[in-house]
Amino acid sequence: MLKKIWTAIKSILEPVAEIISSIVNFILLFIVYLIGVGSVSIIMKLFRRHFLELKKQNKHSNWQGRNVEKEPLEKYYRTF
């Protein structure tokens, strides 16, 4: 008897619990996004720093050269 009542209650409350959990997950992820990404975005705009080079430049090529120096052979074998 109790098992039938419990399964009836469970079948009614499961969809409600899924709706509540999706709402809570949305709210929590939204807050984390605002704190994490939003704060970094505001700080980078204050310092006028850009992570992506999105502006068009009047150059013939987009190649960016790097100044790489050759290291001793022992350093390549010691990874840590």
Image: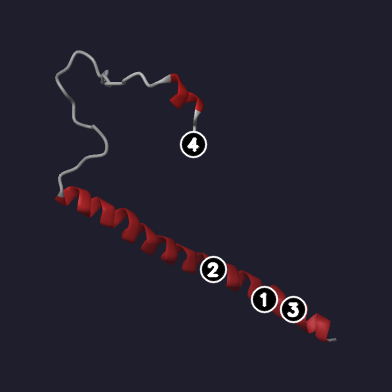
Marks 1/2 in contact by CB < 8 Å: the verdict is no
- Looking at the picture, how far across and down is residue 53, in whole percent? 23, 32
Look at mark 4 in the image and give the residue it sits on.
Answer: 80
| Residue type beneath disc 2 | Ser
| Residue type beneath disc 1 | Ile
Which numbered disc, 4 or 3, marks the residue closer to the eye? 4
Dot 1, how many residues are within 10 Å of its Cα: few (below 14), some (14-19), or many (20+)?
few
- Residue 57 shown left or right of residue 74 in the figure: left
- Residue 47 shown left or right of residue 4 in the figure: left
Look at mark 3 in the image and give the residue it sits on.
Answer: 8
**Mark 2 to mark 4: distance in Å?**
44 Å
Position of 60 relative to 16 (above/below): above
Look at mark 2 in the image and give the residue it sits on.
Answer: 21
- Residue 48 shown left or right of residue 62 in the figure: left
Task: Identify the secondary structure beneath mark 1.
Answer: helix
Look at mark 1 in the image and give the residue it sits on.
Answer: 12
Q: Quadrant of residue 18?
A: bottom right
Residue in view at x 26 percent, y 39 percent:
51
Of 25 and 70, nearer the camera is 70
Position of 55 relative to 14 (above/below): above
